[in-house]
Image: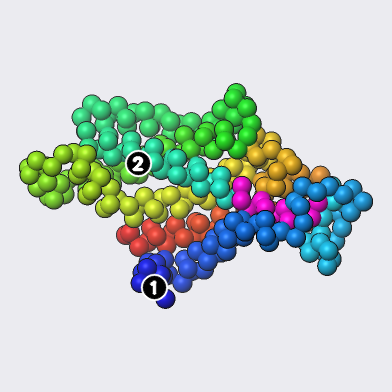
């Protein structure tokens, strides 16, 4: 076991390692989907609709005769990539706004704080639905809208930590030595904020996954027939009435497992910070 692995194990605890393992396995499945999926996820065969588990279809088929196991495997790609993009974009924007605001201070910091407070009053999912409804459905627009809606949450948290860090004596010493503000922020301030940023990004991933799945369920995110867990919950809903809940159950269960894993991992990282 490497030093980095030992360090991560000590940081997250046993439950955190289990959560990290679950996420890692699903991520590998998504990356290797072309080689792991037994069938074409979009291949329709109405004669094979609503088949149960068998040697040919391990998890059965959906209302269009598509292999559920293949769709779940391929669905890991969009279901995990979308939230990852949301987290990356929201974190970069939120951290940049927070650090600049905390460093500049004065009227600039006050103005940023007021804008963040206003954005807090507007529900993130509602903003995403409004943006997608205005500019068109699709994963790209849904990711952009959700990322913007998460920026105030990340900015407020990181700004508070940045203000506390800025008051530390080493920052004053570096300023007196003539080190530029940009250099101080990039080489000293940000590295000390990284544990908090990482913990928040981990928690945000779970929220982003639920919100993206909700948008896909409403037809505003990933569009059918693309294999996506949120789409599968939506397309599988009519089959529940017919007595075939497998598609909804499998896709919904995977969403719950991933969200729970990221929340657990984020909680463990937060405990480590404290």
> Is the residue 3 above or below the residue 92 in the image?
below
Most common secondary structure along the magenta stretch: helix
Residue 122, x across and y down, in percent: 48, 31
Given residues 73 and 199, the one toward you in this image is: 73
- The range drawn in magenta is 66-78
Q: Residues within 10 Å of mark 1 (few under 14, many from 20)?
A: few
Q: Is residue 117 above or below residue 252?
A: above
* Residue furthest right as drawn: 47
Q: Earlier in the sequence, mark 2 or mark 1?
A: 1
Q: Quadrant of residue 129?
A: top right
Q: Position of residue 106 (x, y in %)?
A: 20, 29
Mark sitting on residue 95: 2
Q: Position of residue 151 (x, y in %)?
A: 42, 37
Give me the residue at 51% from left, 47% from top.
84
Where the N terminus falls, by quadrant?
A: bottom left
Which residue is identified by label 1?
2
């Amino acid at each position: 076991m490497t030093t980095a692995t030992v360090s991560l194990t000590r940081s997250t605890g046993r439950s955190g390692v289990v959560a990290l393992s679950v996420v890692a396995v699903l991520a590998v499945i998504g990356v290797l989907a072309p080689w792991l999926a037994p069938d074409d996820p979009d291949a329709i065969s109405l004669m094979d609709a609503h088949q149960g588990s068998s040697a040919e279809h391990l998890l059965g088929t959906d209302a269009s005769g598509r292999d559920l196991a293949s769709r779940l495997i391929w669905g890991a790609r969009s279901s995990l990539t979308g939230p990852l993009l949301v987290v990356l974009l929201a974190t970069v924007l939120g951290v940049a706004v927070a650090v600049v605001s905390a460093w500049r201070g004065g009227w600039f910091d006050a103005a940023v704080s007021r804008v963040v407070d206003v954005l807090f009053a507007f529900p993130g999912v509602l903003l995403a639905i409004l943006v997608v409804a205005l500019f068109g459905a699709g994963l790209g627009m849904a990711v952009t809208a959700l990322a913007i809606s998460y920026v105030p949450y990340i900015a407020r948290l990181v700004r508070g930590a940045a203000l506390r860090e800025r008051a530390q004596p080493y920052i004053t010493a570096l300023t007196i030595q003539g080190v530029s503000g940009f250099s101080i922020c990039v080489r000293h301030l940000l590295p000390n904020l990284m544990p908090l940023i990482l913990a928040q990004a981990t928690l945000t991933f779970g929220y982003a996954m639920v919100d993206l799945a909700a948008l896909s369920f409403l037809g505003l995110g990933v569009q059918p027939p693309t294999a996506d867990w949120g789409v599968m919950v939506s397309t599988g809903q009519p089959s529940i009435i017919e007595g075939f809940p497998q598609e909804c159950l499998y896709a919904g269960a995977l969403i719950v497992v991933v969200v729970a894993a990221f929340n657990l991992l984020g909680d463990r990282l937060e405990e480590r910070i404290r």
